[in-house]
Image: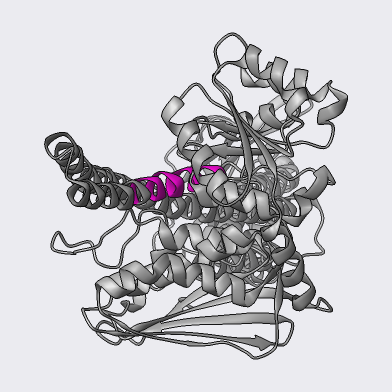
Amino acid sequence: MKTLFETNSVRGKLIMMAMITTLVAVIVASVAMLIYDLVSFQRSWVSDLSTQAEIVGKAVAPALSFNDNAAAEHNLGMLRARPQILVGAIYDANGNRFAGYRQPDLVSPAYPESPGASGYTIDGSELHVYYRVIENGEFLGTVYIREIYPLFERIKSYSMILVSVMLISLLLAGIVASRLQVAITTPLGSITDVARRVIHNRDFSLRVESRDGGEIGTLVAAFNDMLIELGRRADALETTNTRLEQEVRIRESAEEALLQADRRKDEFLATLAHELRNPLAPIRTGLDILRMKEGDKAATAKARDIMERQLVQMVRLVDDLMDVSRINTGKLAIQVAPVSLHAIINNAVEIARPLIDKFAHQFEIQLPVQKLMIAGDATRLAQIVSNLLNNAVKYTPQGGQISLTAALDGNDIEIRIKDNGIGIAPHMQESIFDMFSQADSSIERSNAGLGVGLSLARRLAELHGGSIVARSTGMGEGSEFILRLPALAHLVADEQQAADRQAANAKYRIFLVDDNVDFVKGFGELLELIGHTTLISHDGAEALSIAAAFKPDFAFLDIGLPHLNGYDLVRGLRLKPELQKTVMVAITGWGQEKDRQLALDAGFDAHLVKPVSFDQINAILCDPANRHGQNRVVAKG
């Protein structure tokens, strides 16, 4: 019952609304019916008693005319047939009571002393009626009747009926409302249940099922549409939040990378300054020795050796930086040709040998018996291996152990360089290949370098279709670097070596043009010592006029020449029939990719960046591809 009339629920409110509406309607109808019944009851009761008085008046008219009292009493005796009549009387024309009647059990008849006017009066529970008797226009007298008027009993009985009807109506209204409210409360309950589940579970795929039409169906459809829109917006919000979280993570990673790059930049600049000052100090000392002990051959030779070694170190530092820049901008050109694995390893070991000996390391090499070939740039491949060897040497304490092994693994040549040095922390085994990254960044390190060796080695390996990975079990446990390069199948190494020997034994006519007198004179003397014939010029215009008569096999031309620059000079030389097979090489201090391209476009076969070593020039002379000017070579670094 509490649930049925719970006013906090829609169901209870609907039932209470129906019952209250029914109650008000029943009360209004009952009051109207009661009033109508009372008016009808009174009218009927007065009409009936007035008719009775009229009958009595007609009956006693003769008695009044003849003054027959007995006849009048007899006529009043007819009133006994109606027990509710209490008193009856007849008055003559003078107002004197002529005859009377009273109910047998009535003790005091209480007749009126004189008759009243024709009509009726109600006195409490009694009805009084007066009727004037007129015969042939003559007033004979008045009839008086007093009767019981049961108005209150009528009201009481009728009210009981109305109350019963009201209670039955309310009960029926409650029953009917409780049945009819289901059509409204069931969809509303479904909506409430779905809304609660959506709030708790965040499941916007839920829907309210309803077959109702009208406003309820519209409400359900609107609620379902609202869930669809909320689901769409929730998905969009979740997607946006996910994207924002990803962007925040990316931004945080980028900020961390920028901070790390900034720290590495600062470390790199400090290291660069340190590394450049290191060779500059002995070079300056060597110059002082040459100036102060000009006649002492032993001292000057020793000073020259020191300066040469330091110059090589400086050139190597600058070359590494230039190579990294070219790789980052995609402008590094490599000369692809078949190269012997043994030649690569020998060249790399030759480069790293001074540093290995300096640290007194035990160095072991294991190479395969078969001749393995690689398609790539011999200089760059040797640079990769030498960088890995130098890294092992620098991070291995004095007197350590370093090994280099190479073997054919499937279609790849695998080169392993292992040491028992300081090792690599697990979190550094990938980041050491980042630019300017170093496993040991302490100020006490003895051979720091610029931190570009490993990065440069990996990128050069990738340019050759290979890879480099680092392995270490932890700090103090040593490290191992594994270089994998694609092997070149079906190529006989002996044939290549025979061709190399043939090129190395050849003697050429070489034209040297440079306004740096000391540089060109020194190189000319070295070339003549090994059997070549040289011609030297210091002026572009002069070189153009004397070159055809000399008919050189090779021409090494400076770009910044007086009177005629190197670009215009090579264009002029290319027009001479006698020089069609001459290999022409540019020598300049500008080493950007655009400078190389300008040289090649002008007609040069190769491009060398100052300072140029004798080995670089000799490599061009020994390259079989340059023999008799048969092929143009690509730009060299």
| Display coloring | one colour
Identify which residue is drawn at 40% across, 45% down.
315
Identify which residue is drawn at 30% across, 84% down.
474
Evaluate whether residue 102 shows in this view: no
Identify which residue is drawn at 44% across, 50% down.
320
Residue range corresponding to the magenta coloring: 313-326
Q: Position of residue 102 (x, y in %)?
A: 52, 60
Q: Which secondary structure is most common in the magenta stretch? A: helix
Tell whether 591 sits left or right of 394.
right
Tell whether 61 sits left or right of 98.
right
Tell whether 139 sits left or right of 431.
right
Q: Position of residue 487 (x, y in %)?
A: 72, 76
The foreground one among 100 and 311 is 311
**Residue 320 belongs to magenta span:** yes
The foreground one among 244 and 493 is 493
Evaluate whether residue 501 shows in this view: yes
The foreground one among 310 and 329 is 310
Q: Quadrant of the C terminus?
A: top right
Tell whether 223 sits left or right of 274.
right
**How many labels, in total?**
0
Q: Position of residue 490 (x, y in %)?
A: 84, 79
Q: What is the residue that sits farthest to the top in this orientation? A: 563
Q: Is residue 335 above or below residue 577?
A: below
Identify which residue is drawn at 57% across, 33% down.
587
Q: Is residue 610 above or below residue 150?
A: above
Q: Is residue 581 above or below residue 431?
A: above
**Residue 491 belongs to magenta span:** no
Q: Position of residue 349 (x, y in %)?
A: 46, 72
